[in-house]
Image: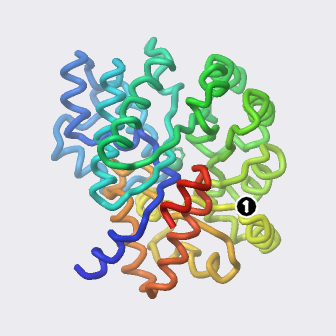
């Protein structure tokens, strides 16, 4: 359609995509075979079964239970390369120009996979995306907030060199939001800041958790970006603060729909954020589970919000300006 073509041509940046959440069934089952991994009984046995189960999730935890099982097929450097390269190809086909991608080392290290193996595979895919697709990217390591803080600290320590050498650009916080508030991770974020002065900080907050999770992430973790953050609008002072500081929310429309954070995409507070001057980007989160990559999310928003070209130009510009790439790359994208 004309609308999809218009949105395809916008210079799109993605700031909220979990590489493990891009594991499509057409890679998951072959990797299980290749690595001799037996999936647990409750996991769908066929692509058809899986597609039926993924139509809707009860909530974030219901989804995470599948997501962590999916991770179990990833073992070798080549697996992580294949995963990320498949994502870059799919997202590039939807008009992606720049991506800041999350990964969860703690969803792999319990199987004996070294963080270096994970990062080596991802980095190779990032380089190929640059060489062959002209897509730029940054890696953001996330801590799993449902795990003990001491384990998270140890994971962070074991990634010190990767941060010092800027192979890892940022730190994030994900998994079950409640009852694991941001303040539990204050020391982890302090440690990451000590690794390198340019380490970027973000955290999932205000997805299922309240606006307080967002303000505590800002105050105590000193993040400069908020992942999801849709419940920020419950606190008018917080909205004013986000606007004043130009703190970007990385919103994931199809995710919030499929995780039943909202009943309908039209319930996302996008109009309110635009009017208040809070920047946001539109992202895919876990596209293999939520049924759409970045352009599909743009299209889903347009179907409900029917924005004019000027509004879309503004949304695309804010996503570029909120990116963690250098000024030269931003100028190319603008
Ligand atoms: N891990 C993968 N996707 C996530 C999400 N949307 N929220 C929290 N943790 C996640
Ligand atoms: Zn997420």
The spot of residue 256 in percent (x, y) is 48, 61
Figure quadrant of residue 46: top left
Asked whether, in this view, residue 7 is left or right of residue 119, the answer is left
- On screen, 32 above or below 241? above
* Residue that appears at 73% across and 31% down: 196
Q: How many other residues sit within 10 Å of disc 1, few (<14), some (14-19) or many (≥20)?
A: many
Q: Going by the image, does 143 lie left or right of 83?
A: right
The percent position of residue 149, horizontal first and vertical second, equals 71, 26
Q: Residue at x 65, y 55 (%)?
A: 226
Q: In the image, what residue occupies the spot 79% across and 73% down?
A: 240
Q: Position of residue 283 (x, y in %)?
A: 46, 59
Nearest the eye: 35 or 116 = 116
Whether ligand 1 has any atom under 8 Å from the Cβ at mark 1 is answered as: no
Vertical arrangement, residue 183 with respect to residue 275, above or below: above
Mark 1, secondary structure of its residue: helix
Residue depicted at x 47% and y 44%: 137
| Figure check: 279 above or below 113 | below
Q: Which residue is mark 1?
A: 211
Residue 127 picture quarter:
top left
Position of 316 compared to 121: left or right?
right
In front of the other: 92 or 202: 92
Q: Nearer the viewer, residue 48 or 224?
A: 224
């Amino acid at each position: 359609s004309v609308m999809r073509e218009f949105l395809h041509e916008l210079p799109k940046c993605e700031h909220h995509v979990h590489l493990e959440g891009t594991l499509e069934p057409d890679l998951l089952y072959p990797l299980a075979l290749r690595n001799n991994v037996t999936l647990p009984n409750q996991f769908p046995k066929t692509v058809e079964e899986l597609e039926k189960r993924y139509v809707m999730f009860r909530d974030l935890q219901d989804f995470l239970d599948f997501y962590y099982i999916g991770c179990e097929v990833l073992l070798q450097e080549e697996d992580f390369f294949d995963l990320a390269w498949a994502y870059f190809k799919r997202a590039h086909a939807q008009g992606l120009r720049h991506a800041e991608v999350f990964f969860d080392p703690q969803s792999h290290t319990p199987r004996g996979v070294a963080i270096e193996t994970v990062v080596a595979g991802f980095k190779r895919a990032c380089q190929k995306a640059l060489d062959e697709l002209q897509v730029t990217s940054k890696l953001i390591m996330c801590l799993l907030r449902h795990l003990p803080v001491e384990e998270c600290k140890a994971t962070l320590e074991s990634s010190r060199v990767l941060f010092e050498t800027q192979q890892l650009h940022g730190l994030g916080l994900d998994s079950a939001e409640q009852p694991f508030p941001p303040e539990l991770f204050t020391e982890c974020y302090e440690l990451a800041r000590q690794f390198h002065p340019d380490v970027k900080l973000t955290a999932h907050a205000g997805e299922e958790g309240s606006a307080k999770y967002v303000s505590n992430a800002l105050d105590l973790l000193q993040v400069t970006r908020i992942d999801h953050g849709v419940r920020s609008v419950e606190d008018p002072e917080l909205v004013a603060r986000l606007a004043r500081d130009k703190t970007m929310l990385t919103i994931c429309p199809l995710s919030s729909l499929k995780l039943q954070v909202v009943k309908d995409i039209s319930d996302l507070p996008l109009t309110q954020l635009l009017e208040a001057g809070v920047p946001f980007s539109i992202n895919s989160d876990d596209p293999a589970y939520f049924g759409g990559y970045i352009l599909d999310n743009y299209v889903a928003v347009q179907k409900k919000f029917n924005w004019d070209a000027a509004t879309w130009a503004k949304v695309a510009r804010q996503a570029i300006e909120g990116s963690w790439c250098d000024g030269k790359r931003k100028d190319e994208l603008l």
